DNA sequence: TTATTAAAATGAACACTGTTTATTATTTTT
DNA sequence: AAAAATAATAAACAGTGTTCATTTTAATAA
């Protein structure tokens, strides 16, 4: 009598359906510009039904947040092909930027959006995020084994690197480069990243 | 017959009143959590009246955006007391962080918030922002005159410095330091900034 | 001072938003 | 086939930014 099991499967399926629609709408328009009614319409259910599967809009946020990090980690997998750890670190930076500008709504939900971040640190969704950060820290550590970053605490340096990358990306994403001529904006990011690479190399 | 002049004065006064209330509410609750009706109630006028003085909520955003930068520049004035340009740059970083955590809603509106940034680059409000950035660039240039940052393009380096500071501050403000233990979070920023200073000094 | 004109303020509405609840429709169990 | 449990919904609530026809207030002209 696997009726309970089937019910649970149906439930998960419905959650998945909702999340898929939410996801699609979200990537196009961003979290704030997608309403529960939009999602409901897309899956051809009433708005109230959504609330049978998700506590509120924020719970959908968490799920998408988790998905975004999953996508991010997948995006980073081919780093493994680069043998030299320092080169891999640089490649990681390049891919970080690529991800940012290819999936701006993801980046937003991952690192910028104000959202009740008082979530369960033990949840599935959160692990993907921790994994991403762990990868950076391990890579910095590995660099140290190869003679880079001497007399630098790897945790602190990792955060500093992340901050720098995030700073550039988020300023660009949130249109704070208007101080520069339009033609220079993209170049600014490039040159800045180049200089950053150089600084890291000489560290 | 200075009636037209007085009318214009009244108009500006009303704009000021609205802005002051908006400002107060905004600093407490943040832009998104302040409604036109809130502002209207505070100044004891009907919501529709606001629209006689501001095109929409975004125009109020612009004004507050400008005010924030003004406040920021004022906050930075006492940098002048530091003679050595490099020390002044470091002090600037310290004050940048101090401003961020003292006036988080300001920082938000200045550097993080998604808002139609397709504004008039020639407006009053914008100039304060440009001035702030100009100060950084000039300071970096001055450092170069004193032997710092050799073979580095000052514009690019300025942006890189800004990015790093913004990265640290905005990640903290938007609660993205949950990967670290609660007790370590504040220290992380401190240590990270310390390392940044060291790197800059050796550049 | 009164009538006319111009300006300012508003109440009410529109089309949205997230969310809750009482009601109805569908399944499962007895 | 009847009763119980589950799922889905329509309708409502309280809120949002914004617009517009109407009314109130102030300035000008007769």
Image (cartoon, coloured by chain):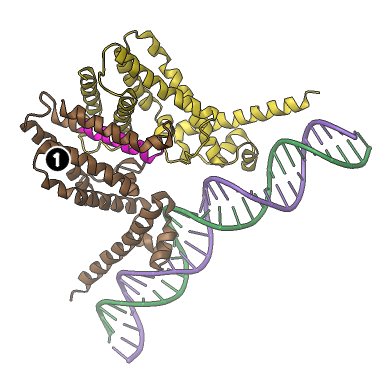
Chain colours: A yellow, B brown, C purple, D green
Q: Nearer the viewer, residue B37 or B198?
A: B198
Question: B54 above or below A80?
Answer: below
Picture quarter containing residue B93? top left
How many discs mark residues in the rendered view?
1
The residue that label 1 is drawn on is: B88
Magenta highlight range: B159-175
Left or right for A188, reference A10? left
- In percent of the image, x 26 and y 64: which residue is there? B12
Q: Residue at x 70, y 28 (%)?
A: A8
Camera-nearest residue between D28 and C29 = C29
Dominant secondary-structure state across the stretch colored magenta? helix
Q: Residue at x 55, y 37 (%)?
A: A59
Percent across and percent down for residue A14 are 64, 30
Element at label 1: helix
Residue B167 counted in the magenta span: yes
Chain letter behind tag 1:
B
Q: Position of residue C22 (x, y in %)?
A: 73, 53
A53 in relation to D26, above or below: above
* B123 lies left or right of A129: left
Residue A90 spot, x, y in % from top left:
30, 17
């Amino acid at each position: 009598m696997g009726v309970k099991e089937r019910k649970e499967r149906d439930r998960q399926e419905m959650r998945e359906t909702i999340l898929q629609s939410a996801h699609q709408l979200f990537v196009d328009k961003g979290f704030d510009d997608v309403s529960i009614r939009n999602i409901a319409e897309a899956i051809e259910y009433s708005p109230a039904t959504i609330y049978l599967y998700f506590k509120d809009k924020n719970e959908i946020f968490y799920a998408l947040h988790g998905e975004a990090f999953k996508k991010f980690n997948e995006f980073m997998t081919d780093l493994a092909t680069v043998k030299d750890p320092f080169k891999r670190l640089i490649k990681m930076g390049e891919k970080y930027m690529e991800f940012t500008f290819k999936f701006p709504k993801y980046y937003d939900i991952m690192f910028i959006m104000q959202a009740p971040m008082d979530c369960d640190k033990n949840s599935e969704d959160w692990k993907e995020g921790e994994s991403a950060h762990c990868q950076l820290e391990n890579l910095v550590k590995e660099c140290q084994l190869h003679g880079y970053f001497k007399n630098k605490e790897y945790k602190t340096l990792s955060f500093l690197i992340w901050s720098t990358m995030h700073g550039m990306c988020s300023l660009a994403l949130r249109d704070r480069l208007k101080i520069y001529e339009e033609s220079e904006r993209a170049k600014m990011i490039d040159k800045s990243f180049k200089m950053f690479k150089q600084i890291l190399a000489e560290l």
